[in-house]
Image (tube, rainbow, N blue to C red):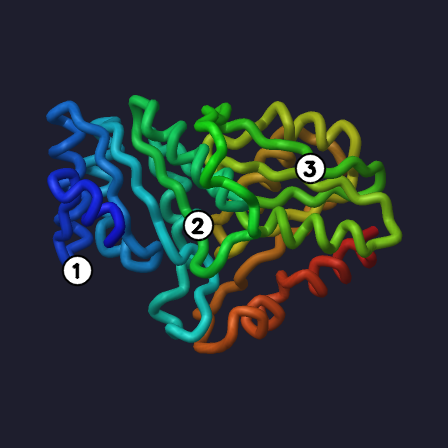
Amino acid sequence: MSMLAKEMPKRFYDVGIEEEHAVTFSAGLAAGGLKPFCNIYSSFSQRAYDQIIHDVALQNLPVVMCLDRAGIVGEDGATHHGAFDLAYLGCVPNLTIAAPRNEWMLRQMMYTASKANHPTVIRYPRGIGEGVEWRDTAFTSIDEGRGERLREGDDVAVVAIGTMANVAMRAAERSQRSVAVYDLRYAKPLDTKMLDDIASRFDKIITIEDGVIRGGVGESVAAYLARQGGNIKVVNLGIDDYFVEHGKPSELYAECGYDEEALLQTINNIE
């Protein structure tokens, strides 16, 4: 943000630690015809939940909410983990919720959101990216609400969201089973066409997300598949019903049961 402030000082507003005001201010800018990008840590966007619903979503205003530090953040402690955004925003009408798996996709999702006429949430984690080239790449619009198959397989399907798609790819490549990997890309709207295709090909599905299981994307996938009928086993991986404490991210992912090793074990054991 400091780079933007330096390059475009007349298009940058620092409202301090005022999350509620940041969202309402952004809604006002959008109502006036602008396309504001509202940047808040995932965990602290909770403070602006009322404003997200009433000032942005209810009026269907084209505010782009960029939620940094989504998921596990490590040594900042329980207050900073962005564990809840997928769950508490997933129930809000009019919101499109995007989760890029790498820095190139973040660039394209931001570009796509800048062209949209509705509110968009883009959530991404703290830390370095995957090392994917993005600076000299062209801007490309992404089909909102459309996922992507990253790996073919015919035994087990892993449905991931955000950076967990990279974890899923690494685990799938290590497994002796035939594992297909899908990246939802958008938590909302769900790509039901892709889910229908997965359900027609697999009876063992694992979902993985960097957030709480209860009310999260995995439960949304399981609920959708249950409504369609059929005998499909769905295992959801993510943060269970507790607050995650202080620790190194690698340790916390393992403790929460959705690091690469935990996913590999789940893939190998699901029947």
**Left or right of 140 in this view: 174:** right
Q: Could you tell me which secondary element the residue under label 3 belongs to?
A: strand
**Left or right of 92 in this view: 10:** left
**Left or right of 261 in this view: 42:** left
The residue singled out by tag 2 in the image is 124
Residue that extends furthest to the bottom in the rendered view of this protein: 246
Q: Tell me the residue at 72%/53% (across/down).
A: 170
Q: Residue 93: tell me if it is visible.
A: no
Label 1 to label 2, Cα distance in Å? 20 Å
Q: Amino acid at mark 2?
A: Tyr
Q: Which is nearer the eye, 175 or 93?
A: 175
Q: Which is nearer the eye, 176 or 256?
A: 176
The residue singled out by tag 3 in the image is 150
The reply to whether discs 3 and 2 touch (Cβ–Cβ < 8 Å) is no
Q: Is residue 62 shown above or below 176?
A: above
Determine the image quadrant of residue 184: top right
Label 3 to label 2, Cα distance in Å? 19 Å
Q: Tell me the residue at 17%/38% (across/down).
A: 26
Return the disc, 3 or 1, that comes first in the chain's sequence. Answer: 1
Please rate how many residues cluster around mark 2, counting C-alpha atoms within 10 Å: few if below 14, some from 14 to 19, many from 20: many
